[in-house]
Amino acid sequence: MDNKTLFDMHGFLAVDSLGVRQHIHETYEPYIKEYLTLNSVAWSLQQNLEVKSGDASSCWPFALYARLLNFTQAAYILAVTGLREQAQTQIRCSLEVLFKLGATNKDRNFYSDYYISELQDQLSNVNSFLDSIQKDKKNKDLKTQAKSRKTEIECELLELLKRHHPALLEKYGEKEAIKKFRLPISEFANKAGLADWYLRYRLASSSIHSDAKSLEYGHFEFSADGTVQCLKNEAHIEEFDDFLLALIEIILKAIEFFCEALNLEQPEDRLNEIKINLAKLCND
């Protein structure tokens, strides 16, 4: 007799057959209520914003904030179906955007370093592409276009470095200066005043890179003596309250940065009510 469930046959595409979503909603309803309320508050701040023509400084905070909210919503959607490790990848992504939103808010001149870093990534991609078609004789036109784009990026990088980091050029020269400039995500966190949050980013990164510990946590069941008792690929429904609290903290900080960047009034009354409700839940 075949006793396989729909989940046994289709995995997370059939997770609703296990009642996972219903169980999470029933078990963690008070926390979910506060998250959904906060999400509504955060989302509404995007509405009816006036952007001055040609004013990029007001466009970037919006774009970063919008992307962050999308990541936090994706994290929630994944988590309520039991895909917790995958939800953690979205937490990591939202933290990276939060650091960038906070850094550029604290120091508007940081936009130039942000852009230089982006150009470095583009240059690295072009170089990798050129390496991949090095021996391909059929793509001469494509190779020419890529080399032209490489030259454009290098010229733009040098202009920006001359303007914002002349000491780097003086010390290393043009070619080496392009390679030497570094803007790690930890620097964004420091500039945002969130250096202590960087560890969260590192821990969440283990899910993206499928580190050994992440794989063990997600797919091994251990016995008391530390040996692998069984293998698993199942919904993670425990500690959903802790997950939501982490998500909420990110959104609260994002609202703070976003409102500061665009000189918006924070909805203090609604936010304080959410914070008070959460404090009560945590103390019960």
Image (cartoon, grey):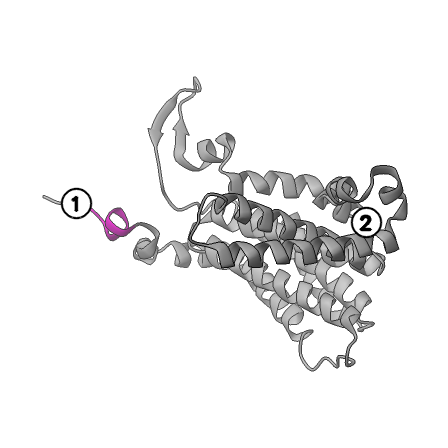
Q: Amino acid at mark 1?
A: Asn
x and y percentages locating residue 20 in the rendered image? 38, 54
Vertical placement of residue 122 versus 230, above or below: below
Q: Is 264 colored magenta in this rendering?
A: no
Locate residue 79 relative to residue 69 in the image: left or right. left
Of 271 and 69, the residue lying toward us: 69
x and y percentages locating residue 132 in the rendered image? 49, 45
Of 206 and 127, the residue lying toward us: 127
| Element at label 1 | loop
Q: Amino acid at mark 2?
A: Lys
Q: Which mark is residue 3?
A: 1
Instruction: Give the image quarter of residue 174.
Output: top right
**Mark positioned earlier in the residue sequence (2 or 1):** 1
Q: Are marks 2 and 1 in contact (CB under 8 Å)?
A: no
Name the residue: 51% across, 51% down.
87
Mark-to-mark CA distance, 2 and 1: 56 Å
Total marks in image: 2
Name the residue: 73% across, 41% down.
179
Viewport quadrant of the N terminus: top left
The residue tagged 2 is 191
Q: Residue furthest left?
A: 1
Vertical placement of residue 152 versus 57, above or below: above
Name the residue: 80% across, 73% down.
264
Locate residue 35 relative to residue 273 in the image: left or right. left
Locate residue 153 relative to residue 3 in the image: left or right. right
| Element at label 2 | helix
x and y percentages locating residue 196 in the rendered image? 75, 41
For label 2, the crowd category at 10 Å Cα-Cα, with few meaning under 14, some 14 to 19 and many 20 or more, is: some
x and y percentages locating residue 262 in the rendered image? 79, 71
Is residue 11 visible to the viewer in this orientation of the structure? yes
Q: Report the span colored magenta.
A: 3-10
